[in-house]
Image: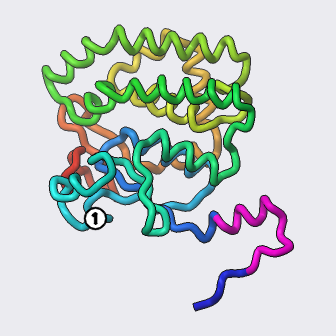
Amino acid sequence: RRPPRSTQGVSSAASDVYKRQLMNLKLIYFKMRALAEAPRILFHFTGIKFEDLMSWEYYGEDWSITKPKVSFKQLPVLIIDDKHEIAQSIAILNYIEKIAGIEIKDQIQSAKADAILQSAQELFAPLNPTVNLATGENFIEKKDMMKPMLMSRFDDFDRALNSGGKKFFIDDKPHACDFAVFHHLDLSKKLDETLIVKFPRLEKFIYDISEIDSVANYLNNRPKLIDVSIEPKLIINGKPHPTGVKQT
């Protein structure tokens, strides 16, 4: 096997890029557009290569068998060099920022970004499960139940963007917290596309994220989520697959 090229004499930034290229990163999740989405977008934004795998593709068995063996019994997880497992989407996002060298250095701004990230995480339930899995009357009931909460949190994000005076939440370039918020705002359109219309600043935020070339390329080519509220499916390699944790 060819020995690794020495990084002696190479600049720190170039050395970091070379190390990232040597890393083997696998993001493991299910057939749904939920907690793995922000890490996927951040990977594409930073240009860091990774494998995007379903649970059964990596573990080779049904999730019901795999679940007890996985950290915190849930996905997503990020597998590093087939040795290390990082659980929890916030931890994964923070790790990607660090290896990409785009973490926020200022401690106060970093804390503010963490607050945005944690607030976005609170939107996961029931928004993500409802959009990806609920059908019929169950979908309608859950949608009606969560609307006040979504409107309140959207107002929080709207005020945070306006008060910050920047293009994104922290500055004029996006960070992990921006992609986490973007995912939930974008997914809310599948629940009720009229909700976000009441917040023009959030619509502008969604547009600005979507217009980043690397992000736009991912969004345009990711599996399409269809038949929400009826029989949710992801179009994978041209074929519709029911959303969920089972292999099809």
Q: In this rendering, would 93 be left or right of 13?
A: left
Q: Residue at x 23, y 50 (%)?
A: 241
Q: Quadrant of the N terminus?
A: bottom right
Residue 97 rendering spot, x and y as whole percentages:
61, 46
Location of mark 1 (residue): 59
Figure quadrant of residue 166? top right
Q: Residue at x 70, y 17 (%)?
A: 164
Q: How many marks?
A: 1
Q: Residue at x 56, y 19 (%)?
A: 202
Q: In this rendering, would 71 be left or right of 101?
A: left
Figure quadrant of residue 122? top left
Residue 193 rendering spot, x and y as whole percentages:
39, 20
Position of residue 78 relative to residue 219, above or below, is below
Q: Is residue 156 visible?
A: yes
Position of residue 218 relative to residue 180, above or below, is below
Q: Is the residue marked by circle 1 packed among few (<14), some (14-19), or many (20+) residues within 10 Å?
A: some
Position of residue 150 relative to residue 207, above or below, is above
Residue 75 rendering spot, x and y as whole percentages:
33, 47
Amino acid beneath label 1: Tyr
Q: In this rendering, would 130 be left or right of 8?
A: left
Does 17 lie within the magenta span? yes
Front position in the image: 123 or 186: 123
Q: Residue at x 29, y 54 (%)?
A: 70
Q: Is residue 248 visible?
A: no
Instruction: Report the residue that reaches farthest toward the left.
Output: 137
Helix, strand or loop status at disc 1: helix
Query: Which contiguous range is marked in magenta?
Result: 6-19
Identify the coloring: rainbow
Front position in the image: 125 or 172: 125
Q: In this rendering, would 169 be left or right of 118?
A: right
